[in-house]
Amino acid sequence: MSGPETWGRRFADKVVLVTGAASGIGAATCVRLAGEGATVVGTDVDEAGLAAVAASVAEMGVGTMATVAGDVADPDDVRRIVAAAVEGHGRLDVLANVAGILRFNNLADVTLDEWAQVLAVNLTGTFLMCQTAMPHLVESGGNIVNMSSTAALGGHPWTHAYSASKGGVLAFSLGLAVEFGRRGVRTNVVAPGSIETPIREQFFFPEGADKSLIHRIVALDQSRGPEAVASVVAFVASEDGAHMNGSVLRVDGGTLS
């Protein structure tokens, strides 16, 4: 398995803010970017998880990670999180919006509260973080990486709110790419699928589900860990991705092939 000794230092002197940093793809992104020299600020509602990821970063001896507990769906928390990153480190170069929640259910069983909660975290949270961080990214000539999903690119069963939220993230991101591209801020989208994360462990077949539909969310390749996505985030957020704006990068092992 690769590690800091082989990753290079593409984020030396860069300040990176990562949401959903306590586990899964968010945690792997913190480790990867810190391993490439970044000053990482990780945020999540899970304070214990954040502390564990920060300890892993410290053990590497490369880069640093500060933590700020908060809810990306809460405007007051978002302002506090972004302020902590900018005031604590003097700038903001990359925003990686990874925070997300997933619910599986038959359409008839989706409650309005469940629908609203998923959209609040996945879509509204991404909007609030981008809106609040954008002036600082314009100042630094930074970039945004937003986490969508293969659920935004092809039909997935039983993920109605999640699919809608991730489709919204994709459309929102493409708008940002156009509006702010000439002001020096790139916005790109990563769309994972068949990644082994805590969010995937919530999967279950709803009552009466046609189990043959599972082929829509099974990769041709083996399932892989969140590090597979973090490496793509690192690429597109670095100068190696300097000519990428409004791109959608699938990391799904051929799920939609």
Image (tube, rainbow, N blue to C red):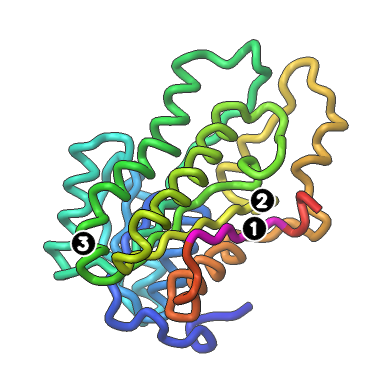
Q: Position of residue 48 (x, y in %)?
A: 35, 49
Q: Is residue 175 above or below residue 185?
A: above
First reached walking from the N terminus: tag 2 or tag 1: 2
Residue 20, relative to residue 253: is it above or below?
A: above
Q: Quadrant of residue 78?
A: top left
Residue 38 x/y as whole percent:
34, 75
Q: Which region of the structure is painted magenta? A: 246-252
Residue 251 lies in the magenta-colored region: yes
Q: Residue furthest top?
A: 108
Amino acid type for the residue under numbered disc 3: His
Above or below: residue 207 compared with residue 162 = above
- Answer yes or no: is residue 21 visible: no
Q: Say how many tags the image has.
A: 3
The quadrant the N terminus occupies is bottom right
The residue positioned 47% from the left and 64% from the top of the image is 245
Q: Which residue is mark 1?
A: 250
Q: Earlier in the sequence, mark 2 or mark 3?
A: 3
**Which circle marks residue 136 in the picture?**
3
What is the distance, in whole Å, between disc 3 and disc 1 at their CAs? 28 Å
